[in-house]
Image: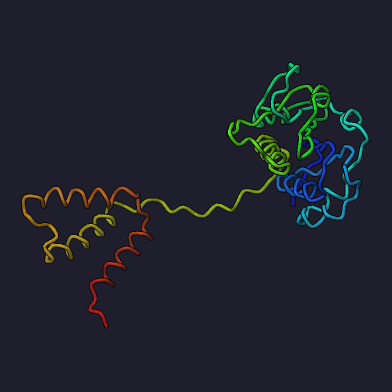
Amino acid sequence: MTTTESGPVIVLVRPQLGENIGKAARAMLNFGLTRMRLVAPRDGWPNPSAGPAAAGADVVLANAEVYETLADAVADCAHVYATTVRKRGVTKPVLTPEEAAKETATAVGGTAFVFGPERSGLETDDVALARKIITVPINPEFGSLNLAQAVILCAYEWSKHAQAAGLAQPPAEEILPPAPQEELEGLIAQITEHLEPRDYFKPAGRAHATRLTLRNMLTKPAWNHLEVRTMRGVITALMRTPR
């Protein structure tokens, strides 16, 4: 697994459940982030419930740092983003996760993404410590994200813009080029040959339109030579006398 120490720090403020800390760690490592900081976790640290929920993201939990206050946790960070809904009385720039990720990918100095407790989110005093706010456009009738979901949104957007992340894309399958027109004409001719004696193109007044529709259907998918050969094999098999 490729990881990076240059990505943002994920700061969990007063997290309540060890399981949620573990799930957040898993979300982080999915996208190459390993630096977690915990501010006054309710049940202390380490928490035995975090490990199983992390599903193998042990490096994140093993290196997690604990702080008494949010101010201490972000003291070395030049760019602090609070993930929250808009807070009354707090006037700060509001960004989407994608916009924040674009900034952090080229930012000079440490970056922290700050997440609040599961039940209540960040308090106004917590948000006041941040430079900017990250808010996710969400269904106004059901705006409840759990902690790991919020973390994975920010981690994923960061990974898309961070060249240093070195994350692996799924291996691309070889895409064959479209078949030559000659092969496609052979497929159309074979289908037509078997349809004519079965009166498919009757009545005669509709024959031309039916042939045209059939040709449009068979030329639309941009079949490659393997697909053409496979389809012709299917047609041949269908025309055999059943055993």
Q: Quadrant of residue 107?
A: top right
In the depicted structure, whether residue 52 falls above or below residue 106: below
- 195 vs 29, left or right, is left
Q: Residue at x 26, y 59 (%)?
A: 187
- Comparing 146 with 180, the one in front is 146
Q: Quadrant of residue 135?
A: top right
Q: Residue at x 12, y 57 (%)?
A: 201
Residue furthest left as drawn: 204
Residue 126 x, y percent position in the rendering? 82, 27
Q: Residue at x 21, y 49 (%)?
A: 213
Which coloring applies here? rainbow
Residue 30 x, y percent position in the rendering? 71, 48
In the depicted structure, whether residue 204 falls above or below residue 103: below
- Comparing 155 with 105, the one in front is 155
Residue 241 x, y percent position in the rendering? 22, 79
Q: Quadrant of residue 230?
A: bottom left
In the depicted structure, whether residue 95 falls above or below residue 31: above
- Quarter of the image with the C terminus is bottom left
- 63 vs 23, left or right, is right
Q: Residue at x 83, y 36 (%)?
A: 13
- 13 vs 188, left or right, is right
Residue 183 x, y percent position in the rendering? 29, 57
